[in-house]
């Protein structure tokens, strides 16, 4: 059986939620149709903003039934990976710039039984992933500079998304192609057209009054027929 998604994965980013009621917000998007919950961890050093650490992930794990998709924007990253794994992260994604040995970092994440992701900043080339693709479950393309929600989508990343789709297909591996930053129903359409299969959305979900409608509106952006979703077997 394949684990490749047979539908678009939508991962609301809790960064745009009401931090006075994170548990209720996590539950609300889950009930509204979210597939994964995206958690942005920032250290005020690797990125110019500070959010939360493993304690918050651990607390959320007690309320969330969907996978916790943890995006680490911290450096150095290696010393904290075990703590996020123990806290209940299901996916752990790291930036190549957040440590000296990306291959070793990915080995560490996988040794803890978690899905491993690599995140490419807008200026980080596709080549950063090529020699570690055998260790990767998720490739995340930043379509904003990391650090803040609510920024404008950087359209120059579309060709990178298309190149990554080709790379993933030629690898023969089941790898999610995830997009983070500035996702709206309009930008969703463009990135899905380039071969993305997993979208992170902060403002476009938590910034709306009706989360179920917000998620449905993004899902409706899926081009038809959705090119990658006829995969079976494997
Ligand atoms: C930015 C974060 C994103 C952010 C996206 O560093 O990685 O996940 O929450 O927010 P929106 O969807 O508002 O651009
Ligand atoms: Zn993120």
Image: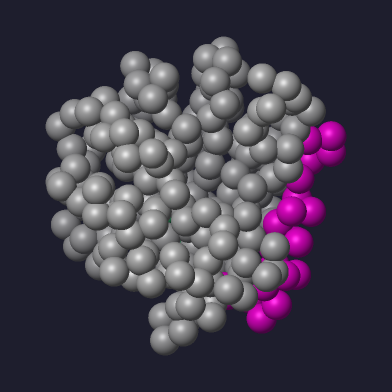
- Of residue 45 and residue 53, the one placed in the foreground of this image is 53
Q: Position of residue 5 (x, y in %)?
A: 67, 38
Location of the C terminus (image quadrant): top right
Query: Does 13 sit above or below residue 78?
Result: below
- Of residue 174 and residue 118, the one placed in the foreground of this image is 174
Dividing the picture into quadrants, the one containing residue 122 is: top left
Left or right for 103, reference 214: left
- Of residue 111 and residue 30, the one placed in the foreground of this image is 111
Its colouring scheme is: one colour
Residue 20 can be seen, yes or no: yes
Residue bounds of the magenta highlight: 206-226
Q: Count the numbered circles shown.
A: 0
Q: Position of residue 135 (x, y in %)?
A: 39, 25
- Which residue shows up at 52% across the image and 60% down it? 37
Most extreme residue toward the right is 225
Dividing the picture into quadrants, the one containing residue 225 is: top right
- Which residue shows up at 62% across the image and 55% down it? 35
- Which residue shows up at 41% across the image and 19% down it? 134
Query: Does 185 sit above or below residue 234?
Result: below
Most extreme residue toward the top is 170
Q: Position of residue 121 (x, y in %)?
A: 36, 41
Q: Is residue 218 magenta?
A: yes
Q: Is residue 157 magenta?
A: no
- Of residue 85 and residue 97, the one placed in the foreground of this image is 85
Query: Does 165 sit above or below residue 144?
Result: above
Q: Position of residue 193 (x, y in %)?
A: 70, 36
Most extreme residue toward the bottom is 20
Dividing the picture into quadrants, the one containing residue 53 is: bottom left
Left or right for 213, reference 40: right
Query: Does 31 sit above or below residue 11?
Result: below
Left or right for 231, reference 29: right
């Amino acid at each position: 059986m394949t684990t490749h998604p047979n539908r678009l994965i939508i991962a609301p980013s809790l960064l745009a939620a009401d931090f006075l009621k994170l548990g209720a917000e996590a539950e609300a998007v889950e009930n509204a149709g979210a597939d994964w919950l995206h958690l942005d961890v920032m250290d005020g050093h690797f990125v110019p903003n500070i959010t939360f650490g493993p304690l918050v992930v651990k607390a959320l794990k007690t309320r969330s039934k969907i996978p916790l998709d943890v995006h680490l924007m911290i450096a150095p990253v290696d010393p904290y990976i075990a703590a996020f794994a123990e806290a209940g992260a299901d996916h752990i994604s790291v930036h190549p710039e957040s440590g000296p040995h990306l291959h070793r970092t990915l080995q560490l994440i996988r040794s803890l039984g978690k899905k491993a992701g690599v995140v490419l900043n807008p200026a980080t080339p596709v080549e950063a992933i090529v020699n570690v693709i055998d260790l990767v479950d998720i490739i995340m393309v930043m379509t904003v500079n990391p650090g803040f929600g609510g920024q404008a989508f950087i359209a120059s990343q579309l060709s990178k998304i298309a190149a990554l789709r080709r790379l993933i297909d030629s690898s023969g591996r089941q790898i999610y192609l995830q997009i983070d930053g500035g996702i709206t129903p309009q930008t969703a359409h463009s990135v899905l057209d380039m071969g993305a299969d997993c979208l992170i959305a902060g403002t476009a979900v938590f910034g709306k009054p009706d989360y179920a409608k917000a998620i449905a509106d993004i899902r409706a952006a899926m081009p038809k027929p959705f090119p990658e979703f006829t995969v079976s077997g494997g």
